[in-house]
Image: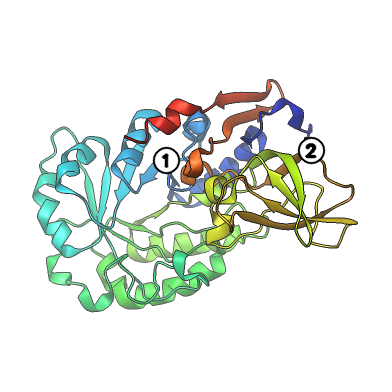
Amino acid sequence: MKAIDWKAAPSPSYVVDERLLLRNFEILKSVQDRTGCDILLALKGFSMFSTFPMARNYLKGITSSSLFEARLGYEEFGKEVHAYAPAYAEHEIDEYLKYVDHIVFNSFDQLHKYKEKVQSVEGKHVSIGLRVNPGYSEVETPLYDPCYINSRLGIPVDSFRPDELEGVEGIHFHAMCEQGSDVLERILVHFEEKYGEYLHQMKWVNFGGGHHITREDYDVEKLVTLINYMQDKYDVKVILEPGEAIALNTGYLVTTVLDIVQNGMEIAILDTSATCHMPDVLEMPYRPHIIGASTPNDKPYTYRLGGMTCLAGDVIGDYSFDEPLKAGDKIVFTDMAHYTMVKTHMFNGVNLPSICLYNEEEGVKVIRQFGYEDYRNRLS
């Protein structure tokens, strides 16, 4: 596989490799082909709509968590649009219904508030679902655990009202984050125990996201077995809505060293920011890999890499390198396509990274660059 010329990329910039994205799409399509399930792109994880012409050849549609995501999927993807939100605002629901084919409610009260409106949409059938909480997960970070104690996400079994399911065609659950099919297998035990009896009256069941299907060590065969088991047992269509698995290991963040300062150790200031450009580094927390770098003290020269904002904790981490760093050196972070572009912000007025695509025929293509007007127009 031809290497990317990092000098051709603006700094900072996200560069998504179309070759790697295609590999992921092919894995996901193989699961669909072998099971008949539907796999959707969760826009909350990856919303790079310049890749949608490629994605729509492999995936059934998108799933959204907000009105703007639903509209983006409707206008740019052009296939099925699914929606789930913890609650829908009255002033947005009519516009939502212009875009969506499936809508999932988080409570029976929201279901009853909007059911008649959903069922009266002209020109199309909008399938109604309910999100439930299976009460079991193996997510270690509470911030990302949909089943954490007192979670607001999904109806717990002690609040479920089976006598109020008229008009409901599907049940949705989401209990995973960056996990394998072995975790899904254990979750399904709890899900079936609590909600399995109601699936016989449903048309579909949505397993949510968090499935790391395109990770190298993911057990795809087990996933296929689980999907077929659920579809055969309950006569329902299984839906999966990964975000991270779509773009896993397909993108990079290209950055440049601006300065080296000393304070007990050598600190490299980059033209990027953990808080602005890769917030999962602080939130998860997550340690991104850097091409040619290693853990502290493994290689001869160790540096702390810091961002360019005034936030004291805007630190990416400590890394070691074969050669001393100097101003102007390129630092390339890997696996920077998912949950990066969708979560960036302009704290301190720091500009956003450019967005680029790469293929072997055209090299690095700059899709979008940002400037002062983007910053100004977010404010008042």
Q: In screen coordinates, is 25 left or right of 260?
A: left
Relative to the observer, which residue lies in front, 334 or 164? 334
Nearer the observer: mark 1 or 2; the answer is: 2
Residue 302 in view in this figure: yes
Relative to 147, say whether 341 is above or below: above
Under mark 1, the amino acid is: Lys
Image position, residue 167 (x, y; %): 15, 55
Residue 307 in the image: x percent, y percent? 63, 48
Q: Mark 2 points at which residue?
A: 329
Q: Report the number of discs.
A: 2
The kind of residue tagged 2 is: Asp
Considering the image in quadrants, where does the N terminus appear?
A: top right
Q: Is mark 2 on a helix, strand or loop?
A: loop
The residue to which callout 1 is attached is: 60
- Asked if 119 appears above or below 200 in the picture, the reply is above
- Of 249 and 346, which appears nearest the observer? 346
Mark 1 touches mark 2? (CB < 8 Å): no
Residue 256 position within the rendered picture, expressed as x and y whole percent measured from the top left:
72, 38
Position of residue 299 measured from the top left corner of the image (x, y, whole percent): 88, 57
- Ranked by sequence position, the earlier of labels 1 and 2 is 1
Q: Which residue is drawn at 44% across and 49% down?
A: 36
Q: In which quarter of the image is the C terminus?
A: top left
